[in-house]
Image: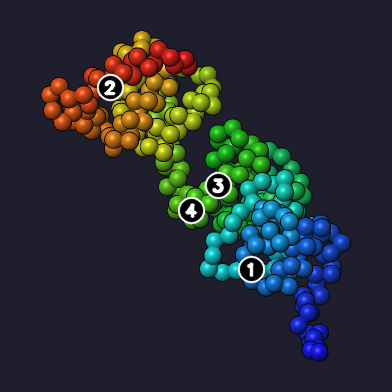
Amino acid sequence: MGIKNPAEDLIIMPKEALSHIKGASLEELKTLIYLFAEGDCNLSDAARELGMTKAQIEAACAFWRGAGIFTESTGKKKAVASDTSIYRNYDAATLADAVEHNTDFSLVCRVASDKLEKQLTKNDISSLFYLFDFVRIPAPIICGVIEFCCQNGKKSLQYVFKKATALYEDGIDTYEKFEEYLARRAAVNSSIGRLRKLCGMGERALTSKETKLFDCWFGEWGMPFETVELAYEKTIDSTGKLSTTYMNGILRRWHEEGFVTVEDVKNGDKGPSAGANTSFEGDEFIEAALSRGFDD
């Protein structure tokens, strides 16, 4: 009969964890025990073994990191829990120490309070510290995101949190990249403003459909204003009215064929030979017929 060595079944963790157990949730306690038992492991595996979501595991890790029990693994970009409703707060002592002694984080809090025009709650500070300490988003970027959101009328820390995590996951992890993003966004907004004027939209707010389409044309597809203007003109010529659905059909086809500029369209839509069925006129006839079933 074999004799089991007790040392093989021991889980060793810092005694300091005891001072934080009272304020920990069940998910955080389960995560603490599991990760010290398993050591380095995939968070997806931990979530499956513990019957939790990966986001809950990430939030629990953030809690123990804030308490100084967990340290960040190097060499791998962290996944981010973008929903603050499942995010567990850092303890008050950790936050107070960060605000008082960390110059960069103190700046983040001052900018947030000033731009959002509110006195930050403990949960607000905890959400900001998650971005700063766990996600490791540099303070200038967090401050820049706050400024950007407020300039666009989004004075909600929840919105700031989601925007910051979305940008981070898109690879914007330096202030230089953030400035490039702002430049691209400014160009898109300028083109949208010109299109609004062209379409006679006045000062009314865009619908969610219009916002999605305009961002796609100018942002995702990188269409110059002149190309979108040409699609608008062809839409009016064919349907006699503004139809963003019809415009999107034209622009989608151009995008799929690799046309970007007006010159691309004029050269590419001539077709391979005279009388070919792929001519632009033939396409316009089909699109015009289909457009009768579209209603914006």
Measured as percent of width and height from the top left, residue 173 is found at 50, 55
Marks 4 and 3: CB-CB under 8 Å?
no
Residue lying at the far front in this picture: please name it: 1
Residue situated in front as seen by the camera: 169 or 138: 169
Measured as percent of width and height from the top left, residue 114 is found at 66, 42
Q: CA distance from mark 4 to mark 3?
A: 9 Å
Q: Is residue 290 visible?
A: yes
Residue 166 is marked as 3
Which image quadrant is residue 43 in? bottom right
Please name the residue that numbered disc 1 is placed on.
Answer: 41
Give the vertical position of 291 relative to 186 (above or below): above
- Whichever of labels 2 and 4 marks the residue nearer the N terminus, that label is 4
Which image quadrant is residue 46 in? bottom right
Question: Which amino acid is tagged 2?
Answer: Asp
Residue situated in front as seen by the camera: 75 or 257: 257
Measured as percent of width and height from the top left, residue 153 is found at 59, 32
Nearer to us: label 2 or label 4: 2
Residue lying at the far left in this picture: please name it: 274
Give the vertical position of 73 relative to 147 (above or below): below
Nearer to us: label 1 or label 3: 1
Question: Which amino acid is tagged 3?
Answer: Ala
Which image quadrant is residue 45 in? bottom right
Nearer to us: label 2 or label 3: 2
At numbered mark 3, what does the secondary structure look like: helix, strand or loop? helix
Please name the residue that numbered disc 2 is placed on.
Answer: 283
Residue 192 is marked as none
At numbered mark 1, what does the secondary structure look like: helix, strand or loop? loop
